[in-house]
Image (tube, grey):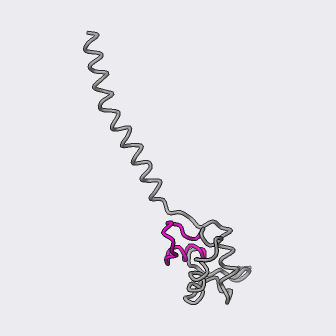
Amino acid sequence: MKTHCTLLLSLCLLILTPAAHFGAEAKKKNERVKSPETPPEAVADVMARFDKNHNGILDAAERAEIRKAFAADASLKALDLNGDGRLDEGELDKAEGGGAPAKPKGKGKKK
């Protein structure tokens, strides 16, 4: 009887060990899939410095200026969310706050 219990316990450990490892690997993979966010202070800095017409949208010329400054300015490294050393369109979209223009305050309210 003691031998049967030992064998059963050993079998359970053999089955559960890879499952636990797989669960840990799946959790790590899911953490990597999450989309990183641009820090809010970096968004405010980028918009203040590069949104020349103050419309809340980075147009092509403003994006080109950011890319040019990116190589020399360490404060812009926070925009490179995937760490590839370049700023792609998605990263610049997040830097401008998701691509939507800022809504004017006080308009559109019903009285």
Residue found at the very far front of the displayed protein: 72
Q: Is residue 106 left or right of residue 73?
A: right
Residue found at the very far top of the displayed protein: 1
Q: Quadrant of the N terminus?
A: top left
- Rendered view: 107 above or below 76: below
**Residue 20: x and y, percent?**
38, 37
- The residue shown at (68%, 86%) is 54
**Residue 32: x and y, percent?**
46, 56
Q: Which residues are magenta?
A: 79-97
Residue 82 within the magenta-colored segment of the rendering: yes
- Rendered view: 29 above or below 15: below
**Residue 35: x and y, percent?**
50, 63
- The residue shown at (74%, 79%) is 111
Residue 11 within the magenta-colored segment of the rendering: no
- Rendered view: 1 above or below 46: above
Q: Is residue 88 left or right of residue 10?
A: right
- Rendered view: 1 above or below 78: above
Question: 36 or 68, which is in the foreground?
Answer: 68
